Image: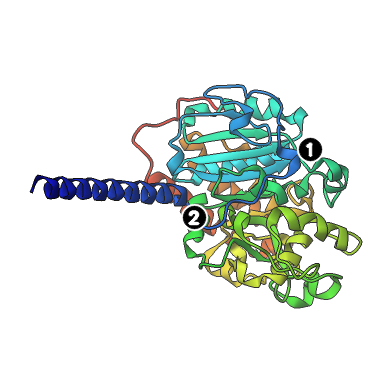
Amino acid sequence: MRRYLRIVVLCLACGFCSLLYAFSQLAVSLEEGAGGGGGKPQAAAASWLAGGGRGGARGVGSSGAAAHPGGSDRYSLKVQPAQRMHLAVVACGERLEETITMLKSAIIFSIRPLQFHIFAEDQLHDSFKGILDSWSFLKTFNYSLYPITFPRENAVEWKKLFKPCASQRLFLPLILKEVDSLLYVDTDILFLRPVDDIWSLLKKFNSTQIAAMAPEHEEPRIGWYNRFARHPYYGKTGVNSGVMLMNMTRMRRKYFKNDMTAVRLRWGDILMPLLKKYKLNITWGDQDLLNIIFFHNPESLFVFPCQWNYRPDHCIYGSNCQEAEEEGIFILHGNRGVYHDDKQPAFRAIYEALRNCSFKDDNIRSLLKPLELELQKTVHTYCGKIYKIFIKQLTKSIQDRYDRAPKESIENIEWL
């Protein structure tokens, strides 16, 4: 009888151990799957990232370069990472002021904390650090500074593609390997409503979509791609990459169809072959490469309306963004240098209003009236004739900001 009892106890012990092992394996798999995990492993980091960097990071709450691939300099303002929205920008040459104004517009209206990933030429790093550190009293954002980084064997070719450093955006999924989702914007972007609202579009992606952009044109008769492109492009008029929302976990895992080989290629493997094949046929550099990729993988792109990327092309020949006419402009994109010349004064008026605005409550509240007066001076242009769409959403965003503002005022804090 004792022998049978021992056998029963032994079987129960073995069963209990097996159950513990099964639960431990389940826990591991769930941990690996967190944040869109599971499935195939991430694409291998490009060779130029291995051992890269500029040494340890500097600043408050900094961490070493090994924790931030690409050799970032990280400055933490102690925002909870689970709540952050990640925004990336690439700044070279004379783009410091534009970039700072863009970041300011993101901070003013957004609700959730922001994590900025700023890729800039080395000579700009100290200027960015000085300005952003002076905003630390806001406690609503963190930022990381990164050097401009391209694959070593083709660095010169990538840097000269279209504008200096513009093609850096193509490598963000490979550099920011720990970031799940990211909003990339050009330096000449201005947010006229919270970043939270475009960030929420990630939830509208279906199971195959990895990125979101707006069409390059609404009106095919003035479209560039459908009239002049010598390469494949997405949809009827192509897409514009100045505002690009990305699920980078999906981007790193996906195998892309292409016209170079029957074998599908991952993000890190497809870029250089595409450049070699099309470099003599592309005009707009990295944007053209993105159009080629999504031409062959249209199921992977979520297309959002034009008011999320409103450019001079939407009004210089007459208004052709119906969504902006109805709801106002959500994100203003001042390409063609219109913030800095007199060709499109309506765009310049918005830029100068936000550039000169401080974070003081009264300053933001009083922004609208003088701005509207400036816009009324632009009615001799096609864009100026519809100036009300430039402030329709901006008015609502400012009102919403103070409807939800905490009782504590920052009016007595001087902005530097």
Please name the residue shown 37% across and 51% down the image: 26
Please name the colour scheme applied to the rendered image. Answer: rainbow
| Residue 101 percent location from the top left of the image | 64, 40
Q: Who comes first in sequence, dot 2 or dot 1? A: 2
In terms of depth relative to the viewer, which is nearer, 389 or 44? 44
Q: Is residue 195 left or right of residue 53?
A: left
Above or below residue 287? Residue 237 is below
Quarter location, residue 267: bottom right
Kindly report the distance in space between the C-alpha atoms of the residues bearing marks 2 and 1: 42 Å
| Residue 71 percent location from the top left of the image | 68, 32
Three-letter amino acid code of the residue under disc 1: Glu
Quickly name the residue at label 1: 94
Count neighbours of disc 1 (C-alpha within 10 A) and say few if under 14, some if 14 to 19, many if 20 or more. Answer: few
Q: Is residue 235 left or right of residue 354?
A: right
Work out which residue is located at the far left of the displayed protein and give it: 1
Question: Element type at marker 2?
Answer: loop
Please name the residue shown 64% across and 59% down the image: 309
Whether residue 115 is visible, yes or no, is yes
Three-letter amino acid code of the residue under disc 2: Gly
Count neighbours of disc 2 (C-alpha within 10 A) and say few if under 14, some if 14 to 19, many if 20 or more. Answer: few
Which quadrant does the C terminus fall into? Answer: top right
Quickly name the residue at label 2: 38
Please name the residue shown 70% across and 29% down the image: 125
Q: Is residue 305 left or right of residue 396?
A: right
Above or below residue 219? Residue 94 is above
